[in-house]
Image: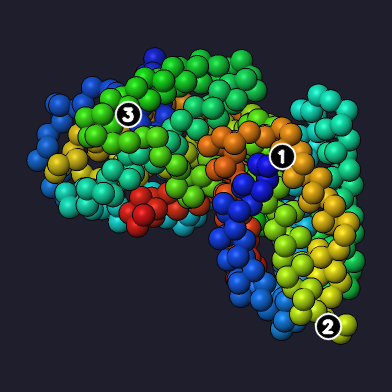
Amino acid sequence: MVWHLKLCQLPRRHLAALSTPMRGRDQHRYNTRRKVQRPFSMGTDDHALVRNAGPLWGAATRSPFLDALAAGDLPADALRRWLAQDYLFAKNLMAFQALLLAKAPRDCHKPLIEGLSALDREMAWFEAHAVRRQMDLAIPLHSIGRSYTDFLMRCAYTQPSPVLLTILFGVEAAYLAAWSALAPSGPYAEFIERWSSADFAAYVAALGGLAERHPHEAAQEYFNEVLVHEREFWKMSWEG
Amino acid sequence: MLHDILWTANFDLARSCLAHPFVQALGSGTLKAALFRAFIAQDAFFLHAFLKAYALALARSDDVETLTSFYELIKGVLEELKLHRAYAAELGTDLESVIPNPACRAYTDFLLRTAWHTSLGETVAAMTPCIRLYAYLGRELALQCSPHHPYRRWIEAYSGEEFERLAGRLEALLDRVGADTREVRDSYRYALQCELDFFSGALCS
């Protein structure tokens, strides 16, 4: 894996939302809802964990929610539900990443520390976004999000750092792939562009490299479990 | 008392558990043996997590009285597991290699996350519903339990005085270390919801 540590200031699912939009990209190139290729996955699809996940990978990275968003006909309540629940997910991921950092060996520190710092900025971005949309973020996690974050936190305390690196890679890689598959057009083009950015892809690639450098015999099992949770989270975002 | 407030406030879920088709079939004795066998295996997996949560709570206790209570409660779970092992031996199930179903996994992840990551009060609030619910279910099902009921031992274990004593002990702990906060209420209710989901998961085995 190629390292792009200087780009690792925008980790975690949404951190790319803080990056500069790709204004220079030719919008007319994207005239379909889904791209034929995923130019920003930067080798994620080739990662052994992804290859060996089988059909779970596709199930975790495609959703009617994303299709509707790309088509511009996403119901407003679904968008609000996803925004609020993803914010609550991110709050929990902050604790997960902090616990991972505490356990991780020295060579993992830089990307993980930058990841935490960026996650803090992301939380602020979400909170500002919620104010603009008059959304209440002090709501309970949906049971699907709760199961996902309970899984993350249980693992954070009971599993060794190689497993936790794999889990974080799974969370981020699936998210990158989900957004990178969409054509950045329509009312949510900005969302799509930001969450499929090269910066975010570089962070995911760095995590993938760490997961390779620190293998664990149970890595695939946990990676697959992340994908099941991702699949369910998208389903919940769409169906409520 | 906090334990009374929480049980009463969430009694709707306890009633739903009693009315659940799995529990009703267990109570009437019509539950298929294969479903009961799978349920015992899932419950044994759950009880291992429950044991760990007690141990984590014990480690977080300061006074001898609280430490002793958790010690007694741990012994209670070990006794409960003996019942499971006896059933497993009779039914030919291996309790050491159980793969949890999604409902069981969600419940144990919730318990362990709570025990590792939150306060002692929230942890006890997450654990009390299980033991109080089973004492309630045992008592209700005992009303229709005949001497030749196929699951009589299970019903007697949960309707017995010893189990009621354990439930009371844990509730007394909840009153002592817990406070009537949003987190404690949420923990208690979610645990009961997990119980209801657990029975649904058992029906899908």
Q: Is mark 2 on a helix, strand or loop?
A: loop
Dot 1 corresponds to which residue? Answer: B174
Dot 3 corresponds to which residue? Answer: A126
Q: Which mark is residue B33?
A: none
Residue visible at 80% across and 37% down in the picture: B55
Instruction: Answer few, some or many: residues within 10 Å of disc 3's Cα (few below 14, many 20 plus, some between 14 and 19).
Output: many
Q: What element carries label 1?
A: helix
Q: What element carries label 3?
A: helix
Residue B89 falls in which quadrant of the image? bottom right
* 1 or 3: mark nearer the eye: 1
- Residue B73 in percent (x, y) is at 84, 45
Dot 2 corresponds to which residue? Answer: B146
- Residue B156 in percent (x, y) is at 85, 69
Q: What residue type is labelled 3?
A: Phe
Q: Is residue B70 left or right of residue B140?
A: right
Q: Which amino acid does label 1 sit on?
A: Leu
Residue A122 falls in which quadrant of the image? top left
Q: Which of marks 2 and 1 is nearer the N terminus?
A: 2
Query: Do tag 2 and tag 3 residues touch (Cβ < 8 Å)?
Result: no
Q: Is residue A216 left or right of residue A124?
A: right
Residue visible at 26% across and 49% down in the picture: A77
Q: Which of B140 and B190 is in front in this view?
A: B140
Q: Nearer the viewer, residue A112 or A50?
A: A112
Residue visible at 32% across and 29% down in the picture: A126
